[in-house]
Image: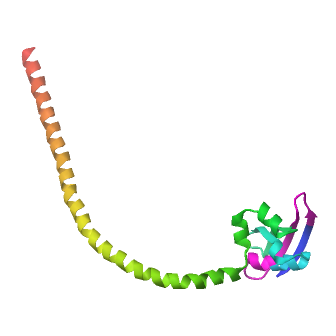
Amino acid sequence: MELKIESQEKSVLPRQDITATVSFGQVTPSRKELKKALAKKAGVKEELVIVRNVYTEYGERKAFVKAYAYDSEDALKHIEYAKVIEKNKSAEPKKEEKTEESPAKEEKPKEEAPKQEEKKEEPPKAEEKKEEKPKEEAKPEKEAEKQEEKAEEKKEEVKAEEKGE
């Protein structure tokens, strides 16, 4: 992966706007890899770099990167959205969270087992609903009969009017 910083400008905010191009092999580099390379090239701490966008074009092995290098952690937390900060965090803290969650995941299947039993009880309810549906189907039949009766009455009225004329 070759990283070339195109521009590095100081903005009004307490940060530097960095635009760069990246040439890469098979796969587009991850934000984490880009963050490390940008921090090294720009001479800034890795924690203060936020990779905002990575633009690639179809079929090319180049990417255009837009990033910000903040002056302090306070400025970073104050200016950037939490979602963007979360995207740019290193994978190491996530691994720790996963190890803490793994015992919780073991407990969840135990909780899911009673839910499966509850689901077994639910199908009879579905059968009851099926029984109700024929009743609802009977109503349209009654309505159809009523419509037929009305049609017959109209025919009789028409015949009576014809005889009366």
Q: Residue at x 62, y 80 (%)?
A: 97
Residue 23, x across and y down, in percent = 82, 77
- What is the quadrant of residue 14 in the picture? bottom right
Residue at the limit of the structure toward the top, as seen here: 165
Residue sitting nearer the eye, 51 or 48 = 48
The residue nearer to you, when weighing 26 against 68, is: 68
Q: Residue at x 92, y 67 (%)?
A: 8
In the image, residue 76 sits, relative to residue 42, either above or below, namely above
Q: Quadrant of the N terminus?
A: bottom right
Q: Choose between 40 and 7: the one closer to the eye.
A: 40
Q: Residue at x 18, y 41 (%)?
A: 143
Where is residue 79? Give x, y as percent: 79, 61
Q: Residue furthest front?
A: 74
The verdict on residue 9 being magenta is yes
Residue 32 can be seen, yes or no: yes
Please identify the quarter of the rendering in which residue 84 is found: bottom right
- Is-magenta flag for residue 14? yes
The scheme the figure's colours follow is rainbow
Q: Establish if 104 lies above or below 80.
A: below
Q: Quadrant of the C terminus?
A: top left
Q: Is residue 104 left or right of residue 49?
A: left
Q: Is residue 23 visible?
A: no
Identify the magenta region.
8-35
Residue at the (78%, 70%) spot, across then down: 51
Residue 164 percent across, percent down from the top left = 7, 15
Q: Position of residue 77 (x, y in %)?
A: 77, 65
Judged left or right of residue 158, residue 59 is right
